[in-house]
Amino acid sequence: MWYTIACMASAPSSDTDDLLDEFLTQRGHDVESAGWEDNYNKKQCPDCGGLHETAAAECSVCGWSPV
């Protein structure tokens, strides 16, 4: 009888994030998020992930607002 043990991957390091950002930037992608993110019919805070109505101007969870 064989048993398989799942291994957990470690979280990516910031070096990996920096390399990925550089790779995407070189290919024309905008990696800096300066505003709300879209999540179906809601706005999502880029800092904490809180969901808000489309009329929201400030995150009611962490207080973030686009500048």
Image: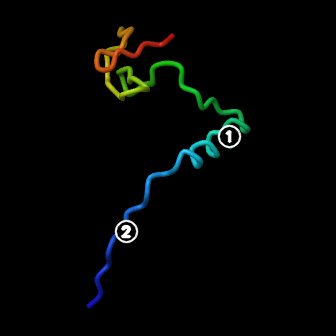
**Percent from the top left, x then y, of residue 59?**
34, 16
- Numbered label attached to residue 7: 2
Q: Quadrant of the N terminus?
A: bottom left
Residue holding disc 1: 22
Neighbour class for label 2 at 10 Å: few (<14), some, many (≥20)?
Answer: few
For residue 28, what is the image quadrant?
Answer: top right
For residue 20, what is the image quadrant?
Answer: top right
Q: Is residue 34 left or right of residue 56?
A: right
Q: Earlier in the sequence, mark 1 or mark 2?
A: 2
Residue at image point 53% right, 20% down = 34
Label 2 sits on a secondary structure element that is loop
Residue at image point 64% right, 46% down = 19
Q: Judge whether 43 appears above or below 17 on screen.
A: above
Neighbour class for label 1 at 10 Å: few (<14), some, many (≥20)?
Answer: few
**Percent from the top left, x then y, of residue 31?**
60, 32
- Numbered label attached to residue 43: none
Which residue ends up furthest to the right in the rendered image? 26
Q: Is residue 37 left or right of residue 2?
A: right
